[in-house]
C-alpha cells in the first residue's frame, strides 16, 4: 500500500476495511484512459468523470491497497459530505448592489442545490425554469423539499412580481435547477460531480454562462475532486461562483470547491457593520489567497418554497447568488466577455475594508453596471 497516495481521513479508516466492508472512494488520475483500462481489466465497477479526470467506486482494504500502487493514479480520496452554506434566520430585505438595464436577459444560470419551487417570481409571466434535473429522487417536475435552492435562485433570478423589494440581481435570466442535495441540505461528492458533469456536457445546449454553487465540503487534498470539477467547468468557459463557507473566523477554512484558484469564491459581508461576517470562511488555501470578494450575507430576504413565499437567511450561500446574478448581468451587457475577464472586472470594482486578503479578498462589491 502506498500511503502517500491515500487521503488522511481515508487512511484513518482503511485499516478497518475488509472484503465485507467497503467505502465509497474517489480516484484522481493523471491518465484517464489508462486508469479506465486498468479498472476494466480488474472488473471494478466504477463511475467515470472524464471531465474531472477521476472515478468513483466502492472499495475495500485490498482494493485500496492495489489502487494506491498504480502509476497512473495520483490520489485516492474518501467521499466527503457536501453541505449547503446556510446559517440562522434573520429579518432584513436584500439590499441591491446594482441598478442596471440588462437584468441577465439572454443568459442562463445553473443552480446546483436542493431544487427549486415553481415560485411566482420564476414562472410569471412565463416560466424561466427551462430545465430541472433531480439527481436525488428522480422526480420529473421542479420541487424543493429543503427551500435552500429556491432561496438562492430567488436572490439571483427572482423578478419581484409579488413584492418588488425582493427582486433578484438577474430577474430576466433563465434558470436551470439541478437537485443534487437532499431534504436535509446534504449530499455526497459523487452526486455533485454528476451535476457538474451534466453542466460540462450540456452548457452550450442551454446557454449556461454561470453556475452557482452555494455549498461546500471539506477539502480532502490538493487533488480534491470537487475542486477539479469546478476547474474543468471554468476551463470550459463557464463562470463558476462558489461559497467560501461558514467556518470562520478561523484561517484556512475555505470549503471545496471554493478553494479552486480560478473560480470566483464569495465571502460574507455584514452590511450593518460593513465588516466581514464572523462566520465567513477565511484563507489561505493550498493554492493561495481566498476568498476573492465579499457580498451581503446577513439578514437577507428571498423566495421560499412555501407560504408566505418569502423568508430570511444568512450565510455565504446568500452572498454567492448575488455575485452569480451580477455575473449574468455583465455577460448580458458584454456577451463576448470571458469568465476570466468577468472575475477581473468584479475584483476591480471592490472596496477594501482592512486589506486582509485572506479575510475579504479584494473587498466588497460597490459598482453599477
Image (cartoon, rainbow, N blue to C red):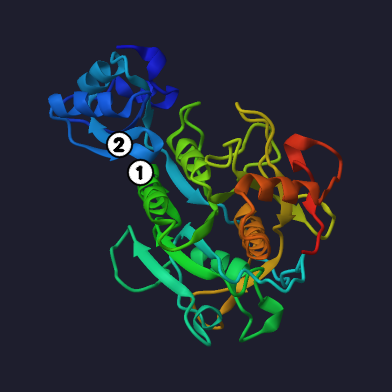
- Image location (x, y in percent) of residue 300: 68, 66
Q: Quadrant of the N terminus?
A: top left
- Image location (x, y in percent) of residue 255: 56, 40
| Residue, disc 1 | 190
**SS category of the residue bearing label 1:** helix
Against 14, residue 232 (above or below) is below
| Residue, disc 2 | 56
Against 219, residue 353 (above or below) is below
* Residue located 40% across and 68% down the image: 131
Against 126, residue 90 (above or below) is above
Q: Earlier in the sequence, mark 1 or mark 2?
A: 2
Residue 270's quadrant in the figure?
Answer: bottom right
**SS category of the residue bearing label 2:** strand
Q: How crowded is mark 1: few (under 14 residues within 10 Å), some or many (20 or more)?
A: many
- Image location (x, y in percent) of residue 175: 49, 68
Instruction: Give the CA distance from mark 1 to mark 2.
Output: 7 Å
Q: How crowded is mark 2: few (under 14 residues within 10 Å), some or many (20 or more)?
A: many
Q: Are marks 1 and 2 in contact (CB under 8 Å)?
A: yes
* Residue sitting at the far front: 336
Going by the image, does 47 lie left or right of 87? left
Comparing 83 with 340, the one in front is: 340
Residue 22's quadrant in the figure?
Answer: top left
Comparing 196 with 83, the one in front is: 196
Amino acid at each position: 500500500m502506498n500511503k502517500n497516495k491515500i487521503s488522511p481521513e481515508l487512511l484513518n479508516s482503511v485499516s478497518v476495511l475488509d472484503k465485507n466492508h467497503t467505502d465509497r472512494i474517489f480516484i484522481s488520475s493523471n491518465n484517464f484512459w489508462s486508469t479506465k483500462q486498468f479498472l476494466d481489466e480488474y472488473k471494478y465497477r466504477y463511475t467515470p468523470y472524464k471531465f474531472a479526470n477521476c472515478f468513483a467506486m466502492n472499495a475495500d482494504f485490498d482494493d485500496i491497497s492495489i489502487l494506491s500502487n498504480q502509476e497512473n493514479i495520483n490520489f485516492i480520496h474518501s467521499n466527503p459530505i457536501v453541505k449547503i452554506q446556510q446559517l440562522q434566520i434573520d429579518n432584513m430585505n436584500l439590499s441591491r448592489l446594482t441598478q442596471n438595464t440588462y437584468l441577465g436577459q439572454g443568459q442562463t444560470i445553473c443552480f446546483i442545490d436542493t431544487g427549486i419551487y415553481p415560485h411566482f417570481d420564476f414562472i410569471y409571466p412565463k416560466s424561466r425554469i427551462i430545465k430541472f434535473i433531480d439527481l436525488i429522487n428522480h422526480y420529473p417536475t421542479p420541487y424543493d423539499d429543503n427551500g435552500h435552492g429556491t432561496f438562492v435562485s430567488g436572490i439571483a433570478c427572482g423578478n419581484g412580481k409579488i413584492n418588488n423589494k425582493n427582486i433578484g440581481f438577474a430577474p430576466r435570466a433563465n434558470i436551470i435547477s439541478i437537485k443534487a442535495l437532499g431534504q436535509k441540505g446534504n449530499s455526497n461528492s459523487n452526486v455533485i460531480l454528476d451535476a457538474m458533469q451534466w453542466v460540462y456536457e450540456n452548457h452550450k445546449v442551454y446557454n449556461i454562462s454561470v453556475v452557482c454553487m452555494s455549498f461546500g465540503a471539506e477539502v480532502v487534498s490538493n487533488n480534491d475532486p470537487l475542486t477539479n470539477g469546478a476547474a474543468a467547468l471554468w476551463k470550459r468557459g463557464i463562470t463558476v461562483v462558489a461559497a467560501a463557507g461558514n467556518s470562520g473566523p478561523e484561517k484556512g477554512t475555505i470549503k471545496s470547491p471554493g478553494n479552486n484558484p480560478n473560480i470566483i469564491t464569495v465571502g460574507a459581508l455584514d452590511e450593518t457593520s460593513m465588516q466581514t461576517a464572523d462566520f465567513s470562511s477565511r484563507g489561505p488555501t493550498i493554492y493561495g489567497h481566498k476568498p476573492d470578494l465579499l457580498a451581503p450575507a446577513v439578514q437577507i430576504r428571498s423566495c421560499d418554497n412555501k407560504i408566505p413565499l418569502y423568508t430570511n437567511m444568512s450565510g455565504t450561500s446568500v452572498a454567492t447568488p448575488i455575485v452569480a446574478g451580477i455575473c449574468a448581468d455583465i455577460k448580458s451587457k458584454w456577451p463576448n466577455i470571458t469568465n476570466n475577464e468577468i472575475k477581473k472586472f468584479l475584483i476591480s470594482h471592490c472596496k477594501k475594508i482592512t486589506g486582509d486578503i485572506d479575510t475579504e479578498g479584494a473587498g466588497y462589491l460597490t459598482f453599477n453596471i
